[in-house]
Amino acid sequence: MERRRDRRPHASTGWLAAAGVPLAFGAALGADPPLDFDLADGTGVRWQADLGSYSYAGPVVAAGKVFVGTNNASPRDLSKTDDLGVLMVFDAIDGTFLWQATHAKREQDIDFPLQGLCSTPAVVGDRAYYVSNRAELVSVDAEGFRDGKNDGPFADEPEVGIHAADVIWSLDLHDELGVTPHFMAASTPEVGGDLVFAVTSNGIAQGGGVPSPEAPSFVAVRRETGDLVWSSAAPGSALIDGQWASPRRFSLGGRERVLFPGGDGWLRAFEATAGAQLWQFDGNAIPAGREPNPRALNVFVATPTLVGARAYLVLGRDPEKGSGDGGLWALDLAAGDGPEVTWFVGGDDFGRAIADAAVADGVVYAADLDGFVVAVDADTGVVRWRYDAFAPIWATPLVTPAGVWIADTDGEIVVLGTGPELEILAELETGSPIYRAPVVDGSLVYLMTTDSLYAIDGKE
């Protein structure tokens, strides 16, 4: 079957930050999410919260709260009506708005208007870590100022009310390290031990070329203070696009390592503590046994999904670049001195993608920007089935015991079976574009559309 090329345009207005899609934690495997709901009339919805007009980051459910990134189109603080990047935090049970962090916009080339905060936060313990739209790596208290304390080395917040953010520390990647994002900064930080790892989003200029080739693309900072421990500018002037993917830690032979997907199409592994580069892998390489064919170069926008010593990762571009040949790689990391290719799916079988692959029960589920979903045997790379959503897909597939949820930018959700043959179990209409996968937590499913957050329990 020949892959469709732009049969339906990508859902975008100007540049809808591809940065907001990566950076996720892969699929959530948990209880069966309820299917009996209607967002229009509220059937099966426990609560709903208004967000901005574009929402790409989250939802993350942690510490009894839901964290999302959005813009300021529906201000929670009426004294702030400007275009802002906003991290909003809600009570997970009843949807009460708790607090928010706001970030002023920079110039359009590096912080595109209305795109909000596109970094999905990593919440660990009582801290949340994210990259702001201003290219700041930020640590905040998960409680905000609701606990009545001003924590951390940073204590000069302009606001200390119960709805304000309690900043622990902030590292300005742009002003302090010279990073120049391409339209948007966004990476979900990875936290391990006393370090926080992040992709800085250093990228190309709007007209081409790399304005800051010596600025770091990858950083590791102290978890408690935000002090820089090590950095790498490895892609340098070879960058093809922006850098919006996220790092992943893994352990091999008792040694901690971290993977950084780059905006030059290379995947690099570093020693986690000292930052020595261990190896690099060219995602645009011609797979063994395939005839070379002319194709545009791709980059890593999605984040690697790790299962044991194997990494599954997809190639893509900024969605504004349109359709093109992509690739889904399975890499064995066990050798230590460099990955070995287990298999590759690409060409007409898989296009450019920005959604992370999801892996469960020996099957890899991956969705591309043309709206095709493939189920691939995790060991052999054999495609079991293929589904056409007829709309671009930015959200990582959500795997549950009852089926695989696929959400697209037309606001439709389809639930597919996990068996060897394609089976459509349910089709749901939300009425609003979806850019991030739903999250299941206990008996609730948290669904974020472009302008609203829902907690769904399926009850009358």
Image: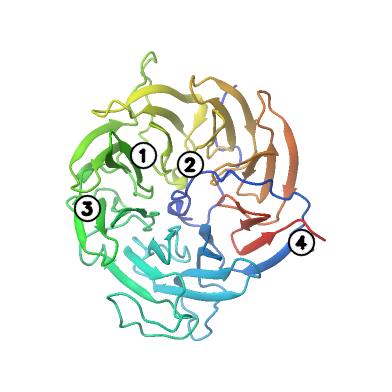
**Residue 40 marker:** 4
Q: Amino acid at mark 3?
A: Pro
* Gap in angstroms between the C-alphas marked 4 and 2: 29 Å
Judging by the rendered image, the residue that carries numbered circle 2 is: 356
* Gap in angstroms between the C-alphas marked 4 and 3: 46 Å
User: Which residue lies at the image location 66% right of the left edge and 70% below the top edge?
Assistant: 94
Q: Quadrant of residue 282?
A: top left
Q: Amino acid at mark 1?
A: Val
Judging by the rendered image, the residue that carries numbered circle 1 is: 299
- Label 3: element kind: loop
Q: Which of 348 and 427 lies nearest the eye of the viewer?
A: 427
The answer to whether the residues at label 4 and label 2 have Cβ atoms under 8 Å apart is no
Judge the density around disc 3: few (<14), some (14-19), many (≥20) Cα neighbours within 10 Å.
many
Judge the density around disc 4: few (<14), some (14-19), many (≥20) Cα neighbours within 10 Å.
few
Rendered view: 204 above or below 450: above
Q: Position of residue 122 (x, y in %)?
A: 42, 58
User: Which residue lies at the image location 53% right of the left edge and 19% below the top edge?
Assistant: 382
Q: Report if residue 104 is visible in the image.
A: yes
Q: Is residue 53 left or right of residue 304?
A: right
Which mark is first along the chain, 1 or 2?
1
* Gap in angstroms between the C-alphas marked 2 and 3: 24 Å
Q: Position of residue 161 (x, y in %)?
A: 46, 86
Q: Is residue 343 left or right of residue 75?
A: left
- Label 2: element kind: loop
- Label 1: element kind: loop
* Gap in angstroms between the C-alphas marked 1 and 4: 38 Å
Which mark is first along the chain, 3 or 1?
3
Judging by the rendered image, the residue that carries numbered circle 3 is: 216
Eye-nearest disc, 1 or 3: 3
Eye-nearest disc, 4 or 2: 2
Q: Is residue 391 left or right of residue 43?
A: left
Q: Amino acid at mark 4?
A: Ala
